Image: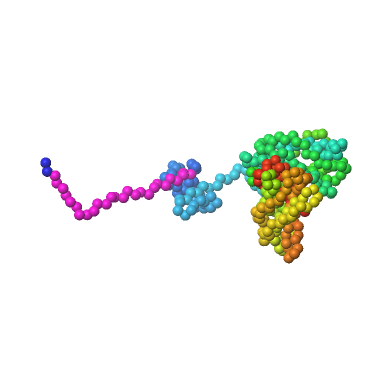
Amino acid sequence: MSFSVKKFTEPIQPRPLLKFPKIYRPKPSVTSPEVIGYPEYSVKTTDKASAETSATAVEPDFGNLATDGSEEVFIVPKQDSTDETPFTSETKAELTANHSAPRPKLHFSVTYNSQQKELHVTIIEAERVGEAPGSEGYILGRLRMATGETETRTATRRLVGRIRWEECLAFPLPGGYEVEGEVALSLRSCDRFSQHANLGDVRFKLADVGMMSDADCWVDLQPPKQDKSTSVGELLLSVSYLPAANRLGVVVMKARELQSDKLKDTIDLSVKLTLKHQSSKLKKKQTRQVKHKMNPVWNEMMMLEVPQELLPKSSLELEVLNQATPGKLDALGRCQLGLQASGTGLQHWQQMLDSPRKQIAMWHPLHV
């Protein structure tokens, strides 16, 4: 057997097999002959329908024209409405209100304890509370009178569709409820970053307590109203206590939503911290100054030596200052932490006592 071998001098190169991928485009969900120019899409129509299609294609409605310059254009003419009623702004507002989510509802009762001279607001439950999973909430109560403001709150509960508290908020009223004043109940949410938000509130006058006494009230919470007279901003603080070293650590983190007439010309903000034992001032410290920022960030830690047995009767007072002119500091707002405080100041201090060696952060409203 003989073999024949042929030799070639030209190099053999592999033949490239490159193909562009096929691009699949979704077909329109329209089954009428008004679809124009779409590839591989045809509808058998009568002459009358074709004539209508041509007439429509001559003057297209550019409001429904969608193209990026390289794709085929398809035009779908608008259909005339059978309802001849004009769509006014009132109709649009009515439809928006009808389709909006329902407001949360609060169930509470009000009584006046004449022996203790206190107004008792019992927070029973809340319904239709819609919030992101993992968030928690509480009810914040405020009593505002000409002599001052009293603030208290319920325990924190996980925000679900229905939340039950059955807690009593007590407001001291030595002169009785037949005075000029207002009670505000707010549903607040807070997440793991201690970000607090107002989900809605309800307000009633002290003069209406007699009519509301011993009766269960179901009230839809209204969207919160911004009240600049009661709060001039918020301050974020983190506190911790080390029992072994008798040291109190305070981190002044940042402030937000500062509102004051003293911030018109110069913005040079700092925070002054004062450690008190009862009415005596033990220690003062101050952060650095942050210029030209309405939401300043400090992130400064201050260590204070406080024996553990003095903590229950000690407190912290923080004050946001603005240096408008050299040598002059204007106070914008202050907040207080301690067992003698109220609202977030009381809650923050109590959590620090219950969880030693743990950093706990919380926003605090600033008051003038």
Front residue of 107/282: it is 282
User: Going by the image, does 16 lie left or right of 287?
Assistant: left
Q: Report the magenta residues as a range.
A: 3-28
Q: Is residue 134 magenta?
A: no
Front residue of 244/268: it is 244
Q: Is residue 11 magenta?
A: yes
Q: Residue at x 75, y 61 (%)?
A: 329
Q: Residue at x 39, y 47 (%)?
A: 21
Q: Main secondary structure of the magenta part?
A: loop
User: In the figure, 191 relative to 285: above or below?
Assistant: above
Can residue 324 be seen in this snapshot? yes
Color theme of the render = rainbow
Q: Quadrant of residue 141?
A: top right
Q: Residue furthest left?
A: 1
Q: Position of residue 197 (x, y in %)?
A: 68, 46
- Quarter of the image where the N terminus is located: top left
